[in-house]
Image (spheres, grey):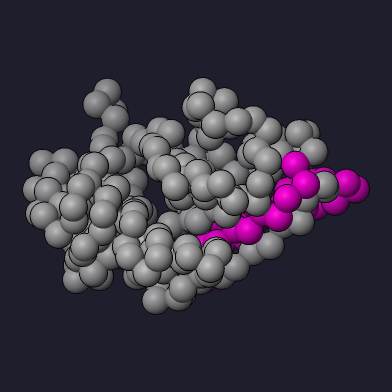
């Protein structure tokens, strides 16, 4: 298996691609995903089942879903597409309902949605599993107080029972994040808060670097767009 970040900037988009001989995985599907896929080195059209894991429903993590589904329909993609999302993620429910209502006359692929809670294991193949971990995240609007906490998950891919890849999504620092990245061969860790004050819904760079000590290798992603 191979993994790569197709794009990642806070408030714009994040999408991580995992390629396996038997399937593709996407972790989050922010705006511009189709363009990012076309700019990557993978074969288009996608020629195997697709598993899409959503960490939470904010627009920079789900904004490219509708266009991706439309793109796959145009390509006559005819493999199973499984969408995994935190239980209670209203954005995914709304986006998928809208897409199916718009294009129910013909859809070449079967789309299945799995609503996940923390500590759930999804079996992908006999040797590959994905486990969900509870993350702590909430919405924010510049100049306003933080909004209510929302359903949010992080994910770890296990290959032959070993933690091969971990991805935090957006989260504040807490014990579950340590559990997620611990002993991972590689981890993608968000640090949107950069050097700002510690808060309950985004990691600082120092927190991300601390978490990186529990992994074999890691990369800090989803940093703040500098011109924001």
Front in this rendered view, residue 170 or 140: 170
Compare residues 164 and 144 and report the one nearer the observer.
Answer: 164
Q: Is residue 216 left or right of residue 16?
A: left
Along the viewing direction, whichever of 94 and 177 lies nearer the viewer: 177
Asked whether 82 falls inside the magenta stretch, the response is yes
Q: Quadrant of residue 82?
A: bottom right
* Residue 139 place in picture, x, y as percent: 36, 54
Number of numbered discs overlaid on the protein picture: 0
Q: Is residue 188 left or right of residue 89?
A: left
What range is drawn magenta here? 77-106
Residue 194 at x, y percent in the picture? 16, 41
Question: Is residue 118 something one can see in this rendering?
Answer: yes
Q: Which image quadrant is residue 211 in?
A: bottom left
Asked if the stretch drawn in magenta spans residue 54, the answer is no
Q: Residue drawn 50% across and 44% down?
A: 19
Residue at 34% across, 35% down: 9
Q: Residue at position x 10%, y 41% from top?
A: 195
Name the foreground residue: 190 vs 165: 165
Instruction: Residue at the far right: name it.
Output: 105
The quarter of the picture where residue 120 lies is: bottom left
Residue 153 in view of the camera: no
Residue appearing at x 55%, y 64% in the figure: 125
Q: Quadrant of the C terminus?
A: top left
Q: Is residue 194 left or right of residue 169?
A: left
On the image, the x and y values in percent for residue 183 come to 21, 63
Pinpoint residue 16: horizontal percent, then vertical percent: 43, 43
């Amino acid at each position: 298996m191979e993994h790569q970040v197709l794009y990642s900037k806070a408030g714009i988009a994040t999408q991580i691609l995992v390629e396996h001989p038997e399937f593709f995985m996407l972790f989050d599907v922010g705006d511009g995903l189709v363009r990012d896929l076309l700019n990557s080195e993978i074969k288009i059209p996608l020629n195997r089942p697709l598993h899409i894991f959503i960490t939470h429903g904010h627009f920079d993590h789900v904004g490219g879903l509708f266009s991706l589904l439309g793109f796959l329909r145009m390509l006559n993609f005819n493999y199973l597409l499984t969408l995994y999302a935190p239980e209670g993620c209203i954005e995914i429910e709304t986006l998928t309902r809208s897409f199916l209502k718009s294009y129910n006359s013909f859809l070449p692929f079967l789309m299945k949605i799995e609503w996940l809670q923390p500590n759930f294991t999804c079996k992908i193949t006999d040797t590959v599993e994905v486990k969900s971990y509870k993350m702590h995240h909430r919405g924010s609007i510049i100049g306003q107080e933080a909004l209510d906490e929302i359903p949010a998950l992080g994910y770890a891919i296990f290959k032959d029972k070993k933690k091969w890849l971990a991805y935090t999504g957006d989260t504040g620092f807490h014990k579950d994040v340590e559990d997620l990245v611990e002993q991972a061969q590689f981890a993608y860790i968000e640090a949107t808060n950069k050097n700002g004050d510690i808060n309950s819904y985004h990691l600082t760079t120092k927190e991300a670097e601390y978490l990186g000590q529990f992994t074999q290798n890691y990369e800090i992603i989803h940093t703040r767009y500098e011109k924001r």
